[in-house]
Structures are given as C-alpha cells and as structure tokens.
C-alpha cells in the first residue's frame, strides 16, 4: 500500500515537472540562440537592402551618364557638316529594326545596346485651374488594352498566346515612309511602312524613378506629361516649341516573342518590343535638362 502511494507521488511530481517545463517556455540557452538567429537574419536583410540600394543608384548613375552623352553627341552633330555627321553617327535603332524584319535570315540585334530617340513635346493650353503646363509626345501612340499587341504584351496567364487582351502599351515611331504634300509638309506615304518600338505604359507605372517633383506623367490618352509650374515660367519654353524628350530604350532580342507585323490605318507596321530605361526632358536651344525619369531596374 505504501509503495503504491509512493509511486503515485512520484508520477505526480514527474507530470508536474513536465507541465511546469512546458508552460515556462524555452530555456535561457534556447532564447539566446533564437535571439542570435534573429539578429543574424536582421543583419543579413540590412546588408542585402544596402547592396540593392547601391546597385539601384549605380544603374541610375550609369543611365544618366549614357543619356547625357547621347544628348551631347546630338548637340555636336547639329553643328557638324554632312560629311562629319556621316563619319561620327552611330547606327540608329530604326536601321537595326529594319534589318531584323528584312529577308536576312540570320539578322539579329546587337546585345546590350541602349538606343536613344528624341520626340517633340507639343504643349497644350496652360491649365490655370491646376497650375500646370501639359504636353503630348509627338510620335508616340497611347494604346490601352491594345489587341494588336496582345502577342507581345499579354496578361501573365496568357503565356504569349495570340488573341489575348493586351496590357496598356505605348508605341514610339522610329521610322516611317513619308512624302511631301503640296504644302511642303512631310506626311506618311499612302500605304507607307512604319517601324516602331512598343513598350509597356510607363505613364501609369512606377518603373521610372523621378527626382523632379514638378514633372509628372499624365495617365490619360490626350496628354502625356505635365510641368507643375507657373505660366510665366513655362511660357518662354512653350512659345517657341523648344522642349523635346529623349527616350532611351533597349530592344528585345527574342524573335519568337518580341517582333510583330501588323497594320495601322492600312500602313504595314513592324514593331519590336522594347523597355524604356530613361526619359529626359530638355531644351533644344540651351541644352538645359529640365527633368529625368530613370529606370533603376536591371
């Protein structure tokens, strides 16, 4: 009887000890190990964030430098003779795009090239209600949910299958077959070909970093860019149509995913998918840079 009682007491003490240990949580040693592990993870995350920030800044600096060099070269060329221009001018994007759509079977785009194309900024009437001067980019088409570009820019679930609804796309004209009309104006030739670069809509995304708070993209169809400034400041620039925008982009090289033949108002159009790396607003007369939009993504 006494031994049975002792056995019960021993079991009670053992169970009480186990319950007490379970309720009291991990030991001091385990807590120290957990705290050390958390500190190591936090330090690693901080290092990775710092490295990512440094890489973004490096990419930004490189792309600003490339854009500035292209602008400087363009300004130099405006002062050169035709012979000098021919000797120094690099092969532009439109020539490479024409080449890959040619009959040459092995024609490919150079890898890693960044191309620069300038477009005129057409000023709208100053908006006094919102204190802003808006512009449209001449030579750029806004194509929200464009069916024509569904093979290049489908939804993620589409897996590049044709016929899917496309995302919002911007189309930059690289080259057109033009002719002079009776008034001496350069117009798109009847049934003339077009060569374009098509990109995802940078106006309604955060893909380009902007350090100029007074310049913003306009998400609508009829205005592309706005300068949040007083009319007396913007007027000297808009009165003589002196502002242009330089677009820096790289062209996709995958023939089965990146090139497209289509028609625009009975004009055969050959498009290549592109990614915008920079957009720089500048004054053509003074060479002043007013705004920079730069991609910080690899």
Image (cartoon, helix red, strand yellow):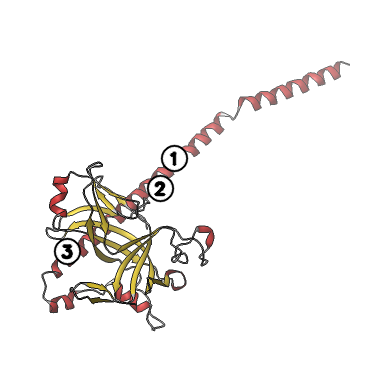
The image quarter in which residue 118 lies:
bottom left
Label annotation for residue 138? none
| Figure check: 11 above or below 294 | above
The image quarter in which residue 193 lies:
bottom left
Label annotation for residue 42? 1
Q: Residues within 10 Å of mark 3 (few under 14, many from 20)?
A: few
In contact (CB < 8 Å): disc 3 and disc 2: no
Name the spot of residue 127 as percent of width and height, x first. Answer: 23, 46
Q: Residues within 10 Å of mark 2 (few under 14, many from 20)?
A: few
Which sits earlier in the primary sequence, circle 1 or circle 2?
1
The CA distance from mark 3 to mark 1 is 45 Å
The CA distance from mark 1 to mark 2 is 10 Å
Name the spot of residue 161 as percent of width and height, x first. Answer: 52, 66
| Figure check: 49 above or below 39 | below
Circle 2 is placed at which residue position? 48
The CA distance from mark 3 to mark 2 is 36 Å
Of circles 3 and 1, which is in front?
A: 3
Q: Is residue 279 left or right of residue 154?
A: left
Going 25% across and 72% down the picture, which residue do you hit?
187
| Figure check: 298 above or below 23 | below
Image quadrant occupied by the C terminus: bottom left
Circle 3 is placed at which residue position? 72
Which sits earlier in the primary sequence, circle 3 or circle 2?
2
Going 37% across and 62% down the picture, which residue do you hit?
199
The image quarter in which residue 86 lies:
bottom left
């Amino acid at each position: 009887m006494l031994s049975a009682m002792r056995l019960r007491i021993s079991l009670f003490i053992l169970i009480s000890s186990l319950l007490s240990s379970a309720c009291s949580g991990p030991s001091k040693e385990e807590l120290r190990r957990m705290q050390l592990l958390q500190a190591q993870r936090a330090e690693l995350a901080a290092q990775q964030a710092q490295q990512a920030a440094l890489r973004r800044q490096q990419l930004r600096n490189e792309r600003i430098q490339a854009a500035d060099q292209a602008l400087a070269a363009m300004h130099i060329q405006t002062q050169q003779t035709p012979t000098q221009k021919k000797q120094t001018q690099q092969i532009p994007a439109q020539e490479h795009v024409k080449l890959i759509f040619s009959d040459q079977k092995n024609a490919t785009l150079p890898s890693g090239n960044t191309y620069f194309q300038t477009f005129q900024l057409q000023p709208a009437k100053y908006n006094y209600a919102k204190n802003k001067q808006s512009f449209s980019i001449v030579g750029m088409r806004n194509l929200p949910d464009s069916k024509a570009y569904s093979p290049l820019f489908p939804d993620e679930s589409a897996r590049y299958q044709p016929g899917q609804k496309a995302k919002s796309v911007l189309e930059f004209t690289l080259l057109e077959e033009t002719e002079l009309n009776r008034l001496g104006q350069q117009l798109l030739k009847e049934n003339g070909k077009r060569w374009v670069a098509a990109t995802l809509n940078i106006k309604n995304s955060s893909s380009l970093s902007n350090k100029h708070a007074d310049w913003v993209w306009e998400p609508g169809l009829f205005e592309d860019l706005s300068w949040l400034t007083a009319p007396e400041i913007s007027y000297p620039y808009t009165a003589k149509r002196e502002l242009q925008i330089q677009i820096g982009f790289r062209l996709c090289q995958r023939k089965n995913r990146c090139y497209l033949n289509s028609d625009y108002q009975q004009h055969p159009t050959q498009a290549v998918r592109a990614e915008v790396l920079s957009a720089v607003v500048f004054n053509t007369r003074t060479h002043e840079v007013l705004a920079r939009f730069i991609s910080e993504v690899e």
